[in-house]
Image (tube, grey):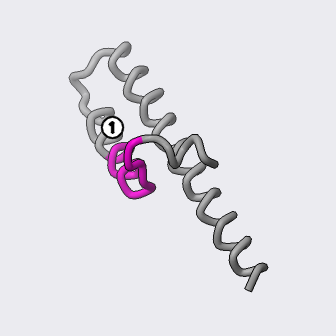
Amino acid sequence: MEDIKNQEDINFEDKIAKAKELLEKLSNPQITINESLKLYNDGLKELELAQKLLEEAKLVFVTQSNNS
């Protein structure tokens, strides 16, 4: 959990916005197969990090709720 918090101002909304941006680029019919693969992989990385951030937020919420 500390590793993600130590990175520069990473937040869930930014990761989702970046994934949407990549999806828009991916839907361009003029990009090459190699560009498509890179965009796809980059999008997956953004979504995986967003999922980790969401899981961490849930863990913090549950922990705080249990301690109350």
Q: Nearer the viewer, residue 28 or 60?
A: 60
Magenta span covers which residues? 8-20
Please give the count of numbered marks on the rendered protein: 1
Establish if 18 lies above or below 55. Answer: above
- Left or right: where does residue 51 sit relative to residue 21? right
Mark 1 highlights which residue? Answer: 22
Q: Which of 8 and 50 is in front in this view?
A: 8
Residue 54 image offset from top left, x and y in percent: 57, 58
Residue 58 image offset from top left, x and y in percent: 64, 66
Quadrant (top left/top right/bottom left/bottom right) for the C terminus:
bottom right
Answer few, some or many: residues within 10 Å of disc 1's Cα (few below 14, many 20 plus, some between 14 and 19). many
Amino acid at pointer 1: Leu
Magenta highlight: main SS:
helix
SS at mark 1 in the image: helix
Does 12 appear in magenta?
yes
Does 24 appear in magenta?
no
Residue found 65% across the figure and 72% down from its top: 61
Q: Nearer the viewer, residue 52 or 9?
A: 9
Which residue, as the protein is rendered here, is positioned at the far right? 66
Residue found 43% across the figure and 36% down from its top: 43
Residue 67 image offset from top left, x and y in percent: 76, 80
Residue found 50% across the figure and 34% down from its top: 45
Residue found 78% across the figure and 79% down from its top: 66
- Left or right: where does residue 7 sit relative to residue 67? left
Residue 56 image offset from top left, x and y in percent: 63, 57
